[in-house]
Amino acid sequence: MAVPLKSGFELQDDPATPATDATVSFRELIPPPDHPRIAGIANHDAHSWCASRRSVSAPAWLIERLELSNLEPYVGFSADGKPDPSVITYGADEGAPVREALAEVESLLAALSDKERSAVLCGSVDDDQFRAWSNPELYVNPGGIRLDETTPAVQDLVHGVLRASLSPEGYAKANGCMLTNHFLGELVNGPRVLNRHSYNFRLFGQPSASEPWGYTFFGHHLCLAVLFCGPRMVVGPTFMGAEPDRIDVGPHAGLRLFAREEIGGLNLMRGLSPENQRRAQTHEGMTCAEGLPPDRWNPFDERHLGGARQDNRVVPYEGLPVSAMTPDQREEVYAIVQAFNVYLPPGPLEAKMRRVRAFEDQTYFAWIGKYGLGDPYYFRIHSPVVFVEFDFHCGIFLTNTSPAKCHIHTVNRLPNGEDYGKALIAQWRRETKARELL
């Protein structure tokens, strides 16, 4: 049965849903202070930590990959290398909270100094800077307002923009990513590198109730690209993650962000017929040492295909067609997709899910890994209008060198030119031109 469109998205474990077994407790994986992954981090801020990582081979490679100079001209994410925005059509009014977001942005801009206002206004929605996000803790793309470098008043105003743009449960989930990042900073004694405010906010376009404008908010384990065009909006691409996957002490003890995706995906896979499990499972091994092909893994994204700098990625459909599932299983697919899009306010979410359901006969479910309760795994759901990925990762700050169920990455790409709202902007321009010709 589909999850209803409602507020109050549950960030804690659902007592009615059995939890999956952990591969290992994250407490066993906290590195000692002299471990190479964190040695000296207490003495660094985000800038100096990134500079120090340039002397370490793997982070240096990653830093180079994420620099703006390596951003390709935009083509679009697709299954065949030929993105087709015509498959996506937006209603005239989808209920996006543009006026509420606009009021919060205007309050923010009024409170900024001239220097801050100049920094946060980063050009038009067509500028490549709109696509320059990154999810590691490495501060590769400075610019805009860095929340841990500004005042509490400005921090609150930026959160006001997020709160006005997103659904209540979506804002809670985004804020939960920030809280979990802060918790990680406490675990590894790196609070100036990893904290609730180690995120950048940038504005694009002239904030308006009718014309396209947007913003990006990004940092470690949380990246959002938000585009408004009158009462319509797009949120994507997005990246959300957590290392560790939950907070176990303090005022936010019990916070767990991805239970719906984690448990829903596993229950779906385990509930398939043996034949359909074989069709869905593209590879049994999660690493190259376990038989995963070398071109299906990299040290930055591991099994993810839609991460940062993958705006033009070509990913053919594979796995199990959703049309081969039972009706209840298909509804679970939609519930998982909805969980990935929970940050959309009610109107845009309903419109999104209508578009998703319209492509049921072109939707695929793919799985990597085993599917016992304790096994780490990857899965994705892919169609002309959906590309969501869930993956258990190796440690970055924690010490596990193989995927474990205490480090989660999720990616939500919008194929066929919908990333960054480009398909919506194109439709708005066509509509504007048609009105001018009348």
Image (cartoon, grey):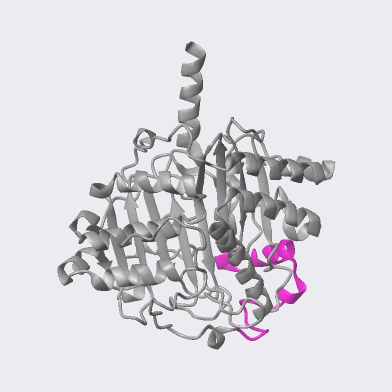
Q: Which residues are magenta?
A: 31-60
* Position of 175 relative to 80 (above/below): below
Q: Is 170 covered by the magenta stretch?
A: no
Q: Which image quadrant is residue 264 in?
A: bottom left
* Position of 190 relative to 22 (above/below): above
Q: Which image quadrant is residue 123 in?
A: top right
**Quadrant (top left, top right, bottom left, bottom right) of the N terminus:** bottom left
For image coordinates 79% across by 46% down, the residue present is 116
User: Which of the two residues, 377 or 207, is positioned nearer the viewer here?
Assistant: 207
Q: Which image quadrant is residue 149 in?
A: bottom right
User: Which of the two residues, 39 or 10, is positioned nearer the viewer here?
Assistant: 10
Q: Is residue 330 left or right of residue 249?
A: left
Given the current orientation, which residue lies at the most extreme bottom position?
A: 28
For image coordinates 44% across by 58% down, the residue present is 340
Give coordinates of residue 203: x percent, y percent.
66, 42
Q: Is residue 30 left or right of residue 377?
A: right
Count all numbered tags in the image, as a single digit: 0
For image coordinates 27% across by 55% down, the residue present is 364
Q: Is 39 covered by the magenta stretch?
A: yes
Q: Is residue 77 left or right of residue 252?
A: left
Given the current orientation, which residue lies at the most extreme left position?
A: 275
Give coordinates of residue 391: x percent, y percent.
42, 67
